[in-house]
Image: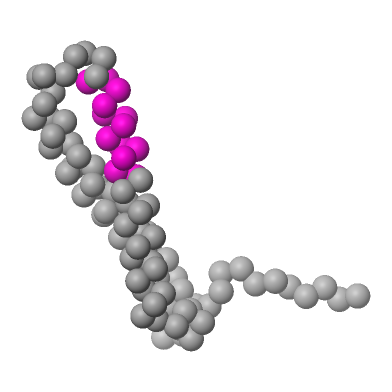
Amino acid sequence: MNKKVNTILFILGATVFNILVTVLAFFLLLIPYVNFMSLMPEGGKIWSFPIIIIAAMVIAFIAYRYALRFLLKKIDMEKYFDPLFVRKHRKD
């Protein structure tokens, strides 16, 4: 495989990883919400669900950063991946 294919596969894999971690964090945060829903006041039920969604996104972002940092230590990115944005030189 060439560098462009590696780059595209890396982006797709990272996206799938991020989505899976978000869904997993959402369901793990949803379990206590369902268990304690009867104890919460009505206003707490309304506001806690969007907070769970935002918290799942934050957890996924943090997990993605740690996974990427770990991967950067193990793999030489310039050797296997093509840059996404290339500067074009101006002709003067």
Q: Residue furthest right?
A: 92
- Viewport quadrant of the N terminus: bottom left
In the image, residue 47 sits, relative to residue 15, either above or below, namely: above
Q: Position of residue 78 (x, y in %)?
A: 51, 82
Q: Position of residue 2 (x, y in %)?
A: 46, 85
Q: Which residues are magenta?
A: 45-57
Q: Position of residue 35 (x, y in %)?
A: 8, 30
- Viewport quadrant of the C terminus: bottom right
In the image, residue 29 sits, relative to residue 39, either above or below, namely: below
Measuring 21% from the left and 13% from the top, which residue is drawn there? Answer: 42
Measuring 34% from the left and 45% from the top, which residue is drawn there? Answer: 57
Q: Main secondary structure of the magenta part?
A: helix
Colour convention of the picture: one colour
Give residue 5's quadrant in the image. Answer: bottom left
Q: Nearer the viewer, residue 83 or 64?
A: 64
Label count reads 0
Measuring 39% from the left and 81% from the top, which residue is drawn there? Answer: 75
